[in-house]
Image (cartoon, coloured by chain):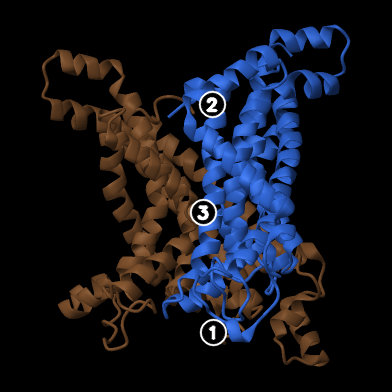
Chain colours: A brown, B blue
Amino acid sequence: MAGRTRAIGMRLAQTVPVILGVIVISFVLTRALPGDPAVYFAGAMADEQSIQQVREALGLDKPLVTQFFLYVGDLAQGDLGRSISTGQPVLTDLAARLPASLELTLSALVLSCVIAIPLGVLAAVRQGSWVDHLCRVLVTAGVSLPTFFTGILLVYIFYYLLGWAPSPLGRLDFIYFEPPRVTGFYLIDSLIAGDLETFAATLRQLALPTITLALFTLAPIARMTRAAMLQALSADYIRTARAAGLSRGKVLFGYGLRNALLPVVTTLGMVFSFVLGANVLVEKVFAWPGIGSYAVEALVASDYAAVQGFVLAMAFLFVTLNLIIDLSYALIDPRIGFDTK
Amino acid sequence: MTEATEIPGRKPDGALAHLLHVLRENPVTMLSFGMFAFFLLQALFGALLVPHDPLATNAAMALQPPNWSHWFGTDSLGRDVFSRVVVATRLDLTISVLAVAISFVIGSVLGAVAGYWGGWIDAGLNRVLDTIMAFPLFVLAMGIVAALGNTIENIIYATALINIPFYARLVRAEVNIRREAGFALAARLSGNSHFRTLAFHIFPNALPPMMVQVSLNMGWAILNAAGLSFIGLGVRPPTPEWGIMVAEGANYIISGHWWVALFPGLWLMLAVFTFNLMGDGLRDIVDPRRRT
C-alpha cells in the first residue's frame, strides 16, 4: 500500500512541471503577439492615452521576468483578463459556458465507449469475421472523417431531408425554457426539476452533435479495445482459465476484458486531446453555446484575452483529465505501485 | 547500415520483391497508392485542367445544382464548385506537406540528439514535449495562429509544432536502442565522428517507421489545417481551400443546397482516407508484425 501511495504521489508531482510549462507557453503566446498587446487589450476604439494606461495597468512597461510573475499572480487569483466582446471577465464567461461543452463531450464519450468497446471485443473474439472487417473499415473511416463535415452531413440528412432532428441551433429549442441551473448540465437539471418534456427536448438537441463527436472518437477506442483484447486473449492465464473449464463468458469478460480495459483507459487520455479539439469544430457547426464556440467568436473578433483564457482553460482541463485517468488507473490496477516506474 | 535493408528501393532485389508481394496481397494498399497519384495529379496540374476559373463569380448562375456544365454545381456567388475543389488540392497538400516536412526535420534532429547523447538534453527535451502534449493539440494550434497572426504560413508553423513530439519521440526511441549496437560501435571504432555515426549509421534505421508516421501524419495535418480554416483562421476567402469551402457551404445546407459543402468535404475526406490507408499499408511493408 505504501508503494501505491508513493506512486500516486509521484504522479501528482509529475503534473507540477507540466502545469508550469503550460503557463510558460501560454505567457509566451500572449507576448508573441504581432504588434502591441496593449492595443489589443484596450480594444478597437482606444486612443493613444488609454492604450498607454492599459500598458501600465497590465505591467507591459516592465521587464519580461517581472511581467511573467505578474501574469502568474493574476492567474493564481483566477484573473484571465476581460473579454472585449462580452465585457465580462474571461473566467466568468468560461465558467458559464463550460457545462454546455462538458455535457456534449461527456455524452459523446459515453456513446462511443458503449459502441466501440463491444465492437472491439467482438472483432477480437471473431477475428477475420465480418464484424472484424466492419471494425477495420469503421476505424480507418472514422479517423478520416473531418468532424465539421460529418456534422454538416448529419444536419442535412436528419434535419433537412428527414426532419427528425430539431434545427441545429444551440442546446434547447427556443420554445422551451432553460431548466433552473443547478449543475449547468441541462439533462441533469431538467431531471432535478422533474421536467421530462425539457429533458426530451434537450436530448433531441444533443443527439446530432453527440453522434458527430462520437463517430470521431469511436475509431481509436475500438482499435485499442481490439488490440488489447487480442493480446489479453492470447495470454497464459486465459489458456489456464479455459483449461480449468470456466464458462466462456467468465473467461471473456471476467479475465479477458478486465485486463484489456487497462490499456483502453490509457488511450482515453489521447482521445480526450482529440475530442477537446474536435469539440470546437462541432460547437461551431451546431451553434452550441460552449467554450469552443466562445473561442471561435473571440478569434473572429480578435478578442485576445478570451482566446488565451480558452487555450489555458483547455490545457488545465486536459491535464486534470489525464491526472484523473492515471490515478484511477493506479486504483484499478493492483500491480501499479509495486514495480518501480 | 546493417539494419537498413528494409528501406524500399535501397536494395531493389529483396525490398522491391517484398513491396510487390505486399501490394498484390493487399489490394487496399494498391488502391491507396492509386488515389495518392490522383491527388498528386490534381495538385500539380489541376489549375490547368479545370473547366472554369475558380474565382470567377457569376450572379446569374448562383446555387445551381450539379449539371453538365457545372459537375459539382455552383456556390452562392456562382463560382464553379468542381474547379474550386480541384484547384484547392494544391493549397491543402502544400500546407500539410510543408508542415509535416518541418516537423520531420526538427523532430528528427531533436530526437536523434536526445536519443544519442541522453543526459540533461534528453530530460529537457522530454519536459518540453510533455508540455506541448499537455495541450489539446488542435486548441494549441488555434492559440498559436491567433498569437502569431492569421496567415497561411502560421497555420503551417502551428501544424508543424504540434506534430514535432510524435517524430521526436519516435526517433529518440529508435536511436536510443541502437546507440550501443555493434554496428554503431564499429562505426565509431573505425574513426567516424559522433556526428557521422549518428547521422549516417544510426539515424537511417529510424527512417522506415518514420515513413509510416509521415503518411499517417499527413492525413492528420490536412484535417488540422482544414479545421483551422473552417473556423476562419489562415486561409481567407475567396481562396479555394476545402475547409473554408465547407464552412461557406454550411450556411446553405439548412436550405438544402447540399452540393456546396458536400464536394469539398468529400475531397477532404478522401485525401485524409488515402493517407491513412497508405500509412497502414506502409506499416505492413515496413513491419509486418505490427499489423493490427
On the same chain, marks 1 and 3? The answer is: no
> In the rendered image, is residue A109 in sight?
yes
Q: Quadrant location of residue A119?
A: top left
Where does the image place residue B275, in percent across and percent down from the top left? 57, 43
On the same chain, marks 2 and 1? The answer is: no
Q: Could you tell me the amino acid type at mark 2?
A: Leu
Q: Indicate whether A107 appears above or below A249.
A: below
Q: Quadrant location of residue B202?
A: top right
Question: Is B168 left or right of A277, judged from the image as shown?
Answer: right
Residues under numbered marks 2 and 1 in contact, where contact means CB atoms less than 8 Å apart: no
Residue named by callout 2? B23
Q: How many marks?
A: 3
Q: Which of label 2 and label 1 is nearer to you?
A: 2
Calculate the distance from the C-alpha at mark 2 to the C-alpha at mark 1: 59 Å
Mark on residue B269? 3
Residues under numbered marks 2 and 3 in contact, where contact means CB atoms less than 8 Å apart: no
The quarter of the rendered structure image containing the C terminus of chain B is top left
Count residues near mark 3 (Cα–Cα under 10 Å), then give few for <14, some for 14-19, many for 20+: many
Question: Is A68 left or right of A210, judged from the image as shown?
Answer: right
Q: Could you tell me the amino acid type at mark 1?
A: Gln
Q: Quadrant location of residue B237?
A: bottom right
Residue at image coords 64%, 52% = A21
Q: Which of label 1 and label 3 is nearer to you?
A: 3
Question: Is A316 left or right of A300, judged from the image as shown?
Answer: left
Mark on residue A88? 1
Chain that bears disc 2: B
Q: Could you tell me the amino acid type at mark 3?
A: Met
Q: Which of label 2 and label 3 is nearer to you?
A: 2
* Extreme residue toward the front, this view: B68
